[in-house]
Amino acid sequence: MSTKNNSREKGELVLRMRGLRMEGQADGEWHEIVKGIDLDLHRGEVVGLIGESGAGKSTIGLASMGFARPGCKITAGSIEFDGTDLMQQSEDYKRNLRGGRISYVAQSAAASFNPAHKLIDQFGEAAVQHGVLTKSEADRDAKDLYRRLELPNPDTIGYRYPHQVSGGQLQRAMVAMAMACKPDLIIFDEPTTALDVTTQIEVLAAVKDIVTTFNTAAIYITHDLAVVAQVADKIMVLRHGNMIELGETRSMIAKPKEDYTRELLAVRTYKKEEFAEANDDVPILKVSNITASYGKGVNVLDNVSMEIHRGHTVAVVGESGSGKSTLARVITGLLPPSQGSIEFEGEILPPALKSRNKDQLRRLQMIYQMPDTALNPRQRVRDVIGRPLSFYLGMQGQEKENRIRELLTLIELDPDHFIDRFPGELSGGQKQRICIARALAAEPELIICDEVTSALDQLVAEEILKLLQRLQNELHVSYMFITHDIATVKAISDEMVVMLQGEIVEQGEKDVVLTPPQHEYTELLLSSVPEMDPDWLDDLLAKRAAGEVVSTIASKPNA
Amino acid sequence: MTRFLKFMQSAPWSARFGMFVIAVYVFVAFFVPVLAPFGETELVGRSYQGWDSTYWLGTDSLGRDMFTRILYGARNTIGIAFITTCLAFLFGGLLGFMSATLGGWVDQLLGRFVDVIMAIPSLIFALLLLTIFGTSVPVLIIIIAVLDSTRVYRLARAVGMNITVMEYVEAAKLRGEGLWWIIRREILPNAMPPMVAEFGLRFCFVFLFISGLSFLGLGIKPPIADWGSMVKENAALISYGDITPLLPAGAIALLTVAVNFVVDWFLHKTSGLRDEH
């Protein structure tokens, strides 16, 4: 620890990785997952690692601490931290570095904090253990950092338990914790992926502030190019364990060299071309004055009314806890509302699932966020898609087989290849396609899509959106699209509904809602979506500080 | 088939040994009339004869051939234990999955009922019920199956709970599927690994329980050969330094160990536990 506080000047080489190769174990065999990566990182510099899942981003991030996850191993190359090759060092030496001079911020702060200890006790744990700080110094530092990261009540928030603060606050507390020993290198592994756009801003601002103030070197891992553009000086694009492109952030965004980088940059620009006109008198779905709650608690939905017309896509937007998924549960009958009614093509739907008949169930289908849990891992594709066919439409034998193949062709999967597979043998995007086919098999009139693209990589998500749009053009099915992602809304919806704390704050045609003047919450949501512009975050924070745009929303008194 | 062979090859020596022992026991249970030198209840000589070339393990208190009776014991004891365990899993599993799927008052009612049964030590409860209903083989099977199904219920409910919260079960409910479909097609296939492992363990417990009851004289009735009662009937010999009465007990112990080896391996395999590096 002697060199620790000597110089924190910008420009000194902190990490030097040469020809890093790693292997991972799957089904008892070793596969190469990182194929020769070189990386230089200087003090005060942030390198963004970007790529789809399976690109090896997290594996490389962990390797910079000299660590390989169980089932992975480093096979070749050198990792020099501050001039010492970590590969040649003992496990004890490396353990001493971790948490002391290198720290790690994980994707899910909620899963990484120990729920049984107060935040401030966990803050100082590593520092006290490494002998850098005493407990009281650690507590003082914690409060300073909490203040710096603009956490509310910085002097007392540390004495709360992890479940007593919000997701964004917890993630910031985690950033503070990573700074406890004033490390030379921090690895941020998708720190904002699990957060709403409005809270993502807070964490991004915190990360940027910490890195510039303390001149710390950082590796920022994400799959979102727009996010990494805000914090990184250099960006490394990875794919299948290979480096595709490495460059300065600004020049890469302005002039990408490789096709794959161009694809990543072009993502989120897909936009629905033609808009459906509302020309039917009776809407497919009419929700009137719905109020609902779980048990006898607070109303999760408060007097919600909306309509969906044939062949239309209505996006329901809001952050987590806004009641958008609860609205879906009410419409599907899983949660009967305490007040209000649901009409399907002019006919009142019974509130509870059990009292609806087969035909009513058939016409309303659902696609879920996580295709992994939405498909039974022990059923083959044939059974998954075949069941609604025989259940609702009474198809059997050859007729059913033909229809399954037809549906697979419709969702752009080759029937001969996929019909006998188990979900475990499919990729995330393919699984979501199977879920779409399962919904379509019932020949529904309305499909509720609950965050269907948020668990997928961006390129895959875009393919799914295009598929859904094509299916709508062909089959005239209506979608209720629940999402927190404004880019998705822009891409697919005709109309949108903005929800906040169980109430609808704004609704109408998409273009009308997206154009000012807007409800201040809509404005906040829209302004929080990262743009492919390295100056976007700084500009926005400056504007918010100057009061030109809304920066917070007062919460409902009784919520 | 090749996949199955590959799976078998990955088994450690303990599991292979276990599978070998179980295979031998099952083989004996099926072909005992061919293998046994004498009849099950046939009186062939004087009582308590020593080991010789005719009576390999000597004779018992009534002059029946010990070796023959040990072979028959495999069929009776294992057969009864197997049927009992199957029944226990049928009751317990079905009710457990029902509890998990339906929740609410069904879950409360079944859960509390099971609590009540589990509150009474099962050996005492079994003795009580056997005295009331008599000790015929069918009664024995049903009583032990019911008592044991409470443990299976607990496991099935816990496993089922984890599965019913999955979205594919919700999707099936939204489709309008009935309870039976959800249990059979959505929950059961996903609950199989822990249930199969539990089946192995439960089988051992049932097996020991029956032998225990027989030893106390309330299990399988003479003259049917049974390992538990064979120990009891010939216990007097132990004081003369003869190890013959311990052989049936050894047979019980060996099978228990073998089953556990296989179950351990299976659990390890299916729980996705992986050796680090």
Image (cartoon, coloured by chain):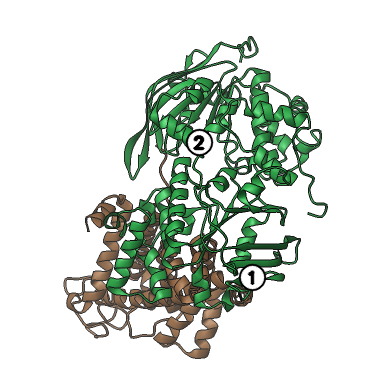
Chain colours: A green, B brown
A374 on left or right of A145:
left
Instruction: Indicate the secondary structure of the residue bearing disc 1.
Output: strand
In the picture, residue A300 is in which quadrant? bottom right
Q: Say above or below: A281 vs B72.
A: above
Chain letter of mark 2 equals A
Q: Say above or below: A251 vs B80.
A: above
Q: Which label is found at residue B213?
A: none
Chain letter of mark 1 equals A
Q: Say above or below: A178 vs A363.
A: above
Q: Position of residue B249 (x, y in %)?
A: 37, 68
Give whichever of B215, B30 is nearer the camera.
Answer: B30
Residue at (67%, 21%) from the top-left corner?
A132
Q: Which residue is mark 1?
A: A342
Q: Which residue is mark 2?
A: A223
The count of marks equals 2
Q: Nearer the viewer, mark 2 or mark 1?
A: 1
Tell me the kind of residue under disc 2.
Answer: His
Residues packed near mark 1 inside 10 Å, few (<14), some (14 to 19) or many (20 plus):
many
Instruction: Indicate the secondary structure of the residue bearing disc 2.
Output: loop
Same chain letter for marks 2 and 1 = yes
